[in-house]
Amino acid sequence: MKKEEMMAIIEERIKNCQSCHLHLLRKNTVPGEGNIYSPIMFVGEGPGEEEDNQGRPFVGKAGQLLTKIIESVNIKREDVYITNVVKCRPPNNRVPTNLEIQSCSHYLTAQIEIINPRMIIPLGSTAATFFLGKEEPITKIRGKKFTWKGDIIIFPMFHPSYLLRNPSKEKGSPKDLTWQDIKEVRRYYD
Ligand code: URA
């Protein structure tokens, strides 16, 4: 079966998913989008309001900043794959619960198996915790390399929402570090 067909099956399953109560609140599921042949994948926490409205990941303010970050190293947003740990919006953008993550994350795992990326970039603590298996402060783990399921490189970065709350561009600030991190990501894209 072709990758496109496999991804379409996953997307259809997500669309019809009722595994946790988040399905009762959603306007749309947000499966993910982008190039399923990309060597890099960005994984956020979960859809926000705008994502829920549109059924697309990272299309609100944080998403616009993520797009800017990606495009700063001459990669087009549509040339990478972007998704989230959970595919439905948690109410008031709260952090998804462990139960919600547990009932949803097999979709993410399936997406990763189809794409088989060289590098996964978890954005923020929730996504990083999913891949690392334990919670660590994002300030401690961003810009470091870990591995998952053998040979996939996990390279956590700050969540763009965090950068919106911390706009300083001073040397050593989260934004400054992010601009360094994305340059490292670029090396794994070619
Ligand atoms: N924040 C996320 O973690 N994911 C989105 O898709 C949007 C905002």
Image: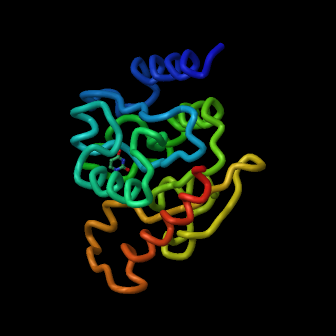
Q: Quadrant of the N terminus?
A: top right
Name the residue nearer the viewer: 94 or 39. Answer: 39
Q: Is residue 100 visible?
A: no
Q: Residue at x 48, y 63 (%)?
A: 182
The answer to which quarter of the image holds residue 132 is bottom right
Rendering coords of residue 92 (x, y %): 24, 48
Rendering coords of residue 186 (x, y %): 54, 58
Numbered-mark total: 0
- Residue 109, relative to residue 176: is it above or below? above
Residue farthest to the right?
150
The answer to which quarter of the image holds residue 176 is bottom left
Decide if residue 156 is on the left or right side of residue 149. left
Rendering coords of residue 81 (x, y %): 48, 40
Q: Residue at x 61, y 54 (%)?
A: 188
Name the residue nearer the viewer: 90 or 8. Answer: 8
Q: Is residue 78 visible?
A: yes
**Display coloring:** rainbow
Rendering coords of residue 59 (x, y %): 27, 43
Name the residue nearer the viewer: 137 or 174. Answer: 174
Residue farthest to the bottom?
171
Q: Residue at x 53, y 23 (%)?
A: 7
Decide if residue 27 is on the left or right side of residue 140. left
Q: Residue at x 51, y 55 (%)?
A: 122
